[in-house]
Amino acid sequence: MSDINLYKMIPKVDELLENELIKNLEDKVARKTIVDSIRLATESIRASINGGKEHEEIKEMIRELGETVVRLASKKSSFKLRPVINATGVVIHTNLGRSPVNPEILDHLREVAKGYSNLEYDLEMGSRGSRYSHLEEVVAEITGAESAMVVNNNAAAVLLVLSTLASGKEVIVSRGELIEIGGAFRVPDVMAQSGAKLIEVGTTNKTHKRDYEASISEDTGAIMKVHTSNYRIMGFTSAVEASELKDVSKKNNIPLIEDLGSGVLVDLSRYGITYEPTVMDSLKNGVDVVTFSGDKLLGGPQAGIIVGRKKFIDQMKKNPLTRAFRVDKFTISALEATFRYYLDEDTVVSKIPTLKMLTYSREILQEKGERLMGMLSREDLQKRVGLTLQDDYSEVGGGSLPMEKLPTKCVVIELEEGSTARFEELLRTNTIPVIARIYRDKVYLDVRTIDDSEMEIVSKAVRRAIDGLEECKK
Ligand SMILES: *Cc1c(COP(=O)(O)O)cnc(C)c1O
């Protein structure tokens, strides 16, 4: 057969639109996407003829056109931001969206979002209200703070606090607390952006109360503490506690502010995790304004929460930056629901997925591991790759508790032949991607961050990856 006849065998767009497989797409996919996919698929066949590909292969491509178009169109029309399965064991994984939220919250969110709401409307007065009012009561009840407000994230919260209280003035910070958080949040840079002047005191490992006292001047706008959430200084060290700094700030009538980072609201040491200072500790120690993230250890949506003295927070509400950093009804609704879980100390850890994953008992992790192993064995996969359940460690992540090693269970996959990197890629390109960890040429699936409802998908994805590797070999 000549090339000319091969070109003629390629069906026309109109003919393909009548193809049974392609017709089925019409309910789900925009017509333009279907037509674009048809063009892409037929052009690729023409290019193959041009390139001198075997005629038998070309004919096969033409026979499979329907499937090819369906695949291209489905790929083109699928959401770009979509769920993945976190098998890395890093609980607060910033690249994977930090804290998952309890689906119960979403019912409420749905009700609020699908219609109008009293976002900025005072139902008692019948007049304009404040979007921050919805959170004030619940935050006050949990933390004891006089007042609260919420902005886009903690970086914005810190910038707003500094800009409101210390623009054009000096802010005293210990050299041991001049941190960088991933993604270009650096205390000195945020300080410069706010218009405040950074006054560094002490040394990297030791800062004393007298260092702060010696730096106070009439230009001082605030004393700031930063929780070194993502690193620790060990050995010959000393830092000045907020409770001691309170004397200095009070005597000089200067606000004491603290960037807590994670903003934990429960004492994690009750669950065998290293004690992390809580928001309540900060306030009790006399800090005037505390900032923390909504989606780290709090376990809610992305947000920056500011709590503390009403007179300072009222000033912040009037700062024009507040408008630029403001949160929408989705965030407020999810945050209010998240905070409400904290009203019941006994159930909060089971209700907030981040806390639940961090506090799983060894028995639960063992049981989760055995369940996943069981599913993989049922598919007879242990005959095709090495499969073992091993002890390992998970991480808290999100720049929180960097030294914490949480004992966990991992399903470890060892290939007899084939590329481990390719295997990991096949898991990652699954319809619902499975994000795994490679260590010493083995694939680790940490069961801590795999929800029970996701086990079946993980097991199928592993089978697909094994099939995929064997397909390559053929
Ligand atoms: C994480 C963190 C931030 C940044 O918070 P985002 O919510 O990511 O903006 C700032 N300061 C500290 C101490 C942190 O740990």
Image: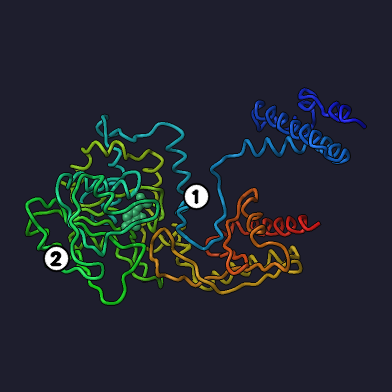
Q: Amino acid at mark 1?
A: Pro
Q: Amino acid at mark 2?
A: Asp
Q: Which residue is mark 2?
A: 211
Q: Residue at x 41, y 55 (%)?
A: 299
Pointer 1: residues within 10 angstroms few (<14), some, or many (20+)? few
In this rendered view, identify the residue nearer to me: 330 or 161.
Answer: 161
Q: Which residue is mark 1?
A: 103
Q: Residue at x 79, y 33 (%)?
A: 50
Q: Quadrant of residue 344?
A: bottom left
C-alpha separation, residue under disc 1 versus residue under disc 2: 49 Å
Disc 1 to disc 2: CB gap under 8 Å: no
The extreme front residue here reads 51
Q: Secondary structure at mark 1?
A: helix
Residue 112: x, y in percent? 42, 38
Q: Is residue 119 left or right of residue 98?
A: left
In this rendered view, identify the residue nearer to me: 265 or 439.
Answer: 439
The extreme top residue here reads 14
Q: Residue at x 48, y 52 (%)?
A: 95
362 up-or-down from 49: above or below: below
